[in-house]
Amino acid sequence: MSSHPWHPIAASHDLPFRHVFHGQLFGREFAVWRADDGYVNVWENRCLHRGVRLSIGVSDGRELKCQYHGWRYSNRTAGCTYIPAHPADAPARTITNRTFPAEERYGLVWSSLEEAAALPRVAGLDDANLLVLRGMPLNAPAALALAHLADYRFQPNNAIDSKEALVSIEAAEGFSIALRARSGSQETLAVFFVQPVDSSRSVIRGVLDRNAEGMVRNTILRHHNERLSALRDRVEREAAALPAAPPIEPVYESVAPELAEMPSLSASGRRAAITVQVARKWMTANDIAGFELRPIRGLLPTFQPGAHIDVHLPNGQIRQYSITNAPGETDSYTIGVKRERDSKGGSSCLHETVREGDLLAISEPRNNFPLRRDAVKTLFIAGGIGITPLIAMAQALSHMSLLSELHYFAQDETQLAFPERLATLGRALTSHLGLNPQATAAKLAELLVDYRPDMHAYLCGPAPMLEVARRIAAEKGWPDASVHFEYFKNTKAIDDSSSFEIALARSAVTLRVPAGSTILEVMRGNGIDMPSSCEQGACGTCVATVLEGEPDHQDVYLNDAEKRSGTKIMTCVSRACSARLVLDL
Amino acid sequence: MITLYDFELSGNCYKLRLLMSILGVEYKIVPVDFYPGREHKSATLLKLNPLGQLPIIDDDGLILRDAQAILVYLAARYDASGNWYPRDNPALLGEIGQWLAFADGITATASAARLHDGLFYDLDVEAARAGAHRLFRILDEHLWFGQQVGRDWICAADHPTISDIACFPYVLLSEEGGISRQDYPAIRRWGDRVKRVPGFIVMSGIFPAGPARAI
């Protein structure tokens, strides 16, 4: 439509010193302010801290201060210079608001949503001698305003009260139209730029090719204001009869890639080593969102079926999600997130806050739920969102043509996640819909009835279902070593009242674990690094080998046989019954 | 001493606090539980104002209701400069009266929309918002043309008057009623100027401006 992306977003007189103007172009809002040195700042109209509009902020001529928590941003660079809540700290240089180009010409302030070549000259206008009309905002699309401007009638500057002038279109390009009015020997060129504010809002910004003084000037401005108001009323009436286009939803820019790739600060603990971008977010089932995570650069680390990643959420929480990918699908990780009604912020953050294009920090994949590929037959039993690790496993075995069955328990058809992946499993997939706990138990008993050596079962689902399935499997003769399970979370109440000593055999260190602290915390506090993930005894990442002593198991990761053997311990929640534990660390 | 029967979140009460702060008038406050208590409809308050509205002042036994009327009284009685309500300037007084009535229109529209959104009043909020936009267009045009001839305030004077105080609160609180001021840049600039009047105070929802540039 236009040969260049520049649009006027304000008049120069809209930017007195120490004022913050509220602008908008194609739905994107701007905070526009003139610094004391004259520089015109056109910024994204949101504070990087809490998203509050900076147009209600305070300009001190050098910095713009957000009204909410007082973050300050510098003239020109829009870099954050001060955070009142951290008075002793220098804000990271990465905290920089988005800026847009600004150009002041013809008494107007121009900007563009993209980096653009120089603002082109407008024929017939000269900066030194022109008259800027009052901007006329309309609740109508720019195109409609432009169409009506073609019929705009006005008088030349020095012939306001003369007989009605002849008006001709001198030029029309993109979002502008130039009209010349002639009456006798008098003529005036008026150039109108229509600023597309949003899909159904615009501002007519007119500039006349001659200035005037005193009362004449005022008369000219009134003349145009009256006629443009009348034009506005006509355009708005017509626009009101049209179906309203939805407002344009601007896409907020994610963090610049070079900033996103900065390594995490902590040397130990739960690292977020990889930055990924949400390439796709979609509802894969009722209340279950799929997220396709792509690397910013390079390749993602290898994952195995059953592996999970830690996702570091924008709200500061860390959550574990299984990778659902089929083998070889290594250009992205796809996770499924169920919206939990009693969400503590994890699932609701992913559902509501995280959008396509956002960057997320994730850990490298860890696999504490490994899949054997040597079973004579493999049973996968999924309850609800427990499908996610199992779907990766089932795809792996299916691709290798190994005998397996995936039994997917869900409320109804709309709850079945990743139907496109399930479809690849063919007859290996059976869904069990709408069963109550008794019917579920009966079905599980049916499925687990004929154990044969070298069969393996993999279970993932809600805790009550896993408890029942494990009990039934044991009753039907399945050895613990053949029944593999993954809990979403450890719902057991952790008793951390004991106090004991740990001796780390390889490190030749003995430490005291007091009541209220975990083995993991005590080791980390003494500089001993240890990987961890869920930190609630569900995922298995922080496992350690026990050489001596009696563990007090409080996790849901180890199976009963493993717990009885006393050779492994989850250092994030489990403790010691004995006074001393010797760990192979 | 003046007693103000006050509700903290009322723009009409705020405009009296604002003028008294600017004039340096001492006053004490009787907080009225306007919401949710509806104390302004209680027998005690109805005795002071049968209309069941705030604000009300009691100045040593003189009981007055209606924000605009009280502005007139306070300026006429307590403003030594004579600028806020210039008793000896009929043309200006007429103009002020005109804009005090306009302020009532703002209360009926922009304030009504805010009562709907904030305090759950049952009213036609779309009509209220449309009415406020109609008034804001008129005010913005008026202020814009004023600026063209070097006039910073609502009335034709080189200083603010009580008409500025009367119109200010519910214009500045309009967004709490879903009424954006984005299309009214001259109103937004005028808001900055009012905020820089010496003695200016804020209320919840009305933020301070930064200092003006030293000339």
Image: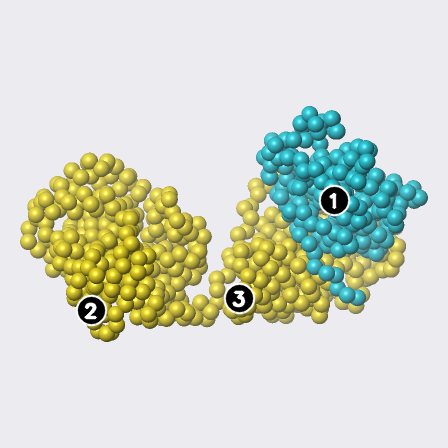
State the residue in front, B31 or A541: B31
Chain ID, mark 1: B
Q: Chain of mark 3?
A: A
Q: Colour of chain B?
A: cyan
**CA distance separating discs 1 and 2:** 73 Å
Number of numbered tags placed on the structure image: 3
Classify mark 2: helix, strand or loop. loop
Which residue in the protein does label 1 denote?
B17
The quarter of the picture where the C terminus of chain A appears is bottom left
Where B112 sits versus B17, above or below? above
Position of residue A472 measured from the top left corner of the image (x, y, whole percent): 13, 44
Q: Quick check: A60 above or below B132?
A: below
Which label sits on residue A584? 2
Can you say which quadrant of the picture contains the N terminus of chain A? bottom right
* Circles 1, 2 touching at the beta carbon (< 8 Å): no
- Real-space CA distance between mark 2 and mark 3, rounded to the nearest whole angstrom: 44 Å
Task: Name above or below for residue A107 compared with residue A465.
Answer: below
- Which numbered mark, 1 or 3, is in the foreground of this view? 1
Check disc 2 and give the amino acid type. Asp
Residue at x 60%, y 65% (from the top left corner): A73
Residue type at mark 3: give it.
Ile
Discs 2, 3: same chain: yes
Looking at numbered disc 1 in the image, what kind of residue is underneath it? Answer: Arg
In this orientation, does residue A9 appear? no
What's the mark number on residue A95?
A: 3
Q: Colour of chain A?
A: yellow
Q: Chain for mark 2?
A: A
